[in-house]
Amino acid sequence: MKKRIYIFLEYYYPKSQRVSAQLISELADQITQYENEVFIIVPDPDIKYPYEVKIINDQKVVFFWSPDTKVSNRFLRALSEMILSCTSYICLRKFVKKQPPDYLICLSPTIFYGPYLTFLQKKYKIRNYLILRDIFPQWAVEVGLIKENGLVHIFFKFFEELNYKSASIIGLEAPSILKQFNLRHPNHSHKTELLFNWVSEISTKHIKKESLREKYQLENRIIFFYGGNIGIAQDVQNIIRLADKMREVENIAFVILGHGTERNKISDLIREKGLEDIIVFAEGVPHEIFMDYISEIDIGLITLNKNNKGHNIPGKILNYSRMGIPILGSVNPNNDIIEIINSNNAGIVVENGNDEAFKEAAINLLDVSTRAMKSEGSKSLVKKIFNVEKASKKILDKIS
């Protein structure tokens, strides 16, 4: 019997090109194949009150009106997010009454859907699967954005706890994150499990629209590519240091695409070090163009701040693996991705802070035969670990 599933998240296509949008789009596609009806539910300050239903990538997306949760002013953003459960309840009342859910899935962050999800669970006697990715506010404390046990931290911790209470099952993306979460939140450890991120295999229907090499005149160069958020947690300065150390190497280029709080700082750093000839630094692009670009690169870059205590797996790995791109990374100590990438021969990942090891790994990947071998290892991750079919069945088994 066909079931109706609501999937809640904070950002989605077409406004957002974040990995979270891709994750949910591919999860929804897979769940729909099992003859379920899926509604992706997202706040949007620009739609007509109270909600609008649109078809995006063949999926039904319900945009409900909400104050802007993306404003730069931190106080206004916190206020908008704090009332997210209220606005979703008010704006979605008629929609929910017409098409009540059988199951709930929520991607976190955000942490502010908890009260509304609890209401839906109790009203319809259903279960909620919380896909927990960035553990907020923990990571914000670790990178110095907020003070531990300060008023802001206490405020966010209150809503974090409500979010966990709303969950029937909590899926975390790596073994060390699961262990860390259970130690920090022992009262919720009975309902946690490992749920790796996922990606579908590349569609044979994909039609290429734009060439990265042609646009930036990078023919005959080995391309090191980073595309994604440029914030404190990512430490993109790490890549700038690598490019600086490799400026004398011939026929290479670094391409960095994205947005984020550190974007201006990175732009200034490239200019100060005189790296314009070796680094292409540009705005982020829509997902379809992003995939066009990845199909032409040689090495996919990942970087994480060495001070991160959490061990989240960068979402950009998913697209690298789907395209069979060798992965070069420099991440926080003890991150599971070091073992995953290195043991599967999918690339080379070192600890952030060891700049010489990062450079040595990059030099190793300049060899064409080494890249070919790592490419096969990278591609294998989609079937072995980051598999959308396995993830969707695991989620449905726990909430049905």
Image: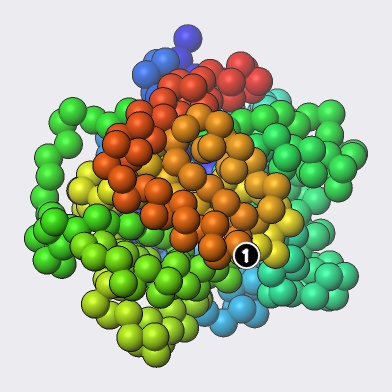
How many other residues sit within 10 Å of disc 1, few (<14), some (14-19) or many (≥20)? Answer: some
Query: Which residue is label 1 attached to?
Result: 353
| In this view, 240 is above or below 367 | below
The picture places residue 2, in percent across and down from the top left corner, at: 45, 15
| In this view, 24 is above or below 32 | below
**Nearer to us in this view, 39 or 266:** 266
Position of 25 with respect to 146 (left or right) is: left
Quarter-wise, where is residue 16 in the image? bottom left
Numbered disc 1: secondary structure: loop
Badge 1 amino acid: Gly
Q: Residue furthest bottom?
A: 272
Does residue 88 appear anywhere in the picture? no
The picture places residue 266, in percent across and down from the top left corner, at: 43, 79
**Quick one: quadrant of the C terminus?**
top right
Q: Coloring scheme of the render?
A: rainbow
The picture places residue 151, in percent across and down from the top left corner, at: 83, 75
Position of 151 with respect to 384 (left or right) is: right
The picture places residue 113, in percent across and down from the top left corner, at: 64, 50
**Nearer to us in this view, 387 or 272:** 272
Q: Which residue is drawn at 51% across and 68% down?
A: 238
Quarter-wise, where is residue 86 in the image? bottom right
Numbered-mark total: 1
**Nearer to us in this view, 245 or 239:** 245
Position of 33 with respect to 86 (left or right) is: left
Q: Which residue is drawn at 84% across and 34% down?
A: 189
Q: Which residue is drawn at 31% across and 72% down?
A: 248
| In this view, 180 is above or below 175 | below
